[in-house]
Image (cartoon, rainbow, N blue to C red):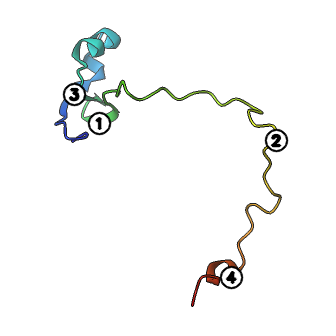
Amino acid sequence: MLRGVKIITKLVDVANLQDIRDFLIDVVEPDTEIILSNGNTPIAKLIPFNSTQSLPQDRIPDLYPTMWVSDNFDDLLPGEYWLKDQP
């Protein structure tokens, strides 16, 4: 279930499709997931896109030019750090 919505699953064998794009556009529905298969082997699952979500944005290099990361960022924290709040 996707947020309380029952999802209908449809199996589509890509070997039997002449024009997959038109077919998928015709069968896609908000409550339907489509599994693409090659014969009996599943190869991909298409799920509905939630229109309230935004598409991923490209990263912008140097968006925050004053931000820096310490040279020891990946170093392990000392034991005192983990034990400092212990009674």
* Amino acid type, mark 2: Thr
Residue pictured at 29% horizontal, 30% vertical = 37
The residue that disc 2 covers is: 66
Q: Amino acid at mark 1?
A: Thr
Q: Amino acid at mark 3?
A: Thr
* Residue 34 locus on image (x, y percent): 26, 28
Q: Is residue 35 above or below residue 74?
A: above
All told, the count of numbered labels is 4
Q: Do the residues under discs 4 and 2 have CB atoms within 8 angstroms?
A: no
Q: Earlier in the sequence, mark 4 or mark 3?
A: 3
Label 2: how many residues lie within 10 Å, few (<14), some (14-19) or many (20+)?
few
Distance from Cα at disc 4 to Cα at disc 2: 31 Å
- Whether the residues at callouts 1 and 2 have beta carbons within 8 Å, the answer is no
Disc number for residue 41? 1
Q: Which residue was labeled with disc 3?
A: 32
Residue in the foreground of this view, choosing between 38 and 52: 52
Comparing 86 with 1, the one in front is 86
Badge nearest the viewer, 2 or 3: 2
Asked if residue 62 is positioned above or below residue 27 in the image, the reply reads below
Q: CA distance from mark 1 to mark 2?
A: 50 Å
Q: Earlier in the sequence, mark 4 or mark 2?
A: 2
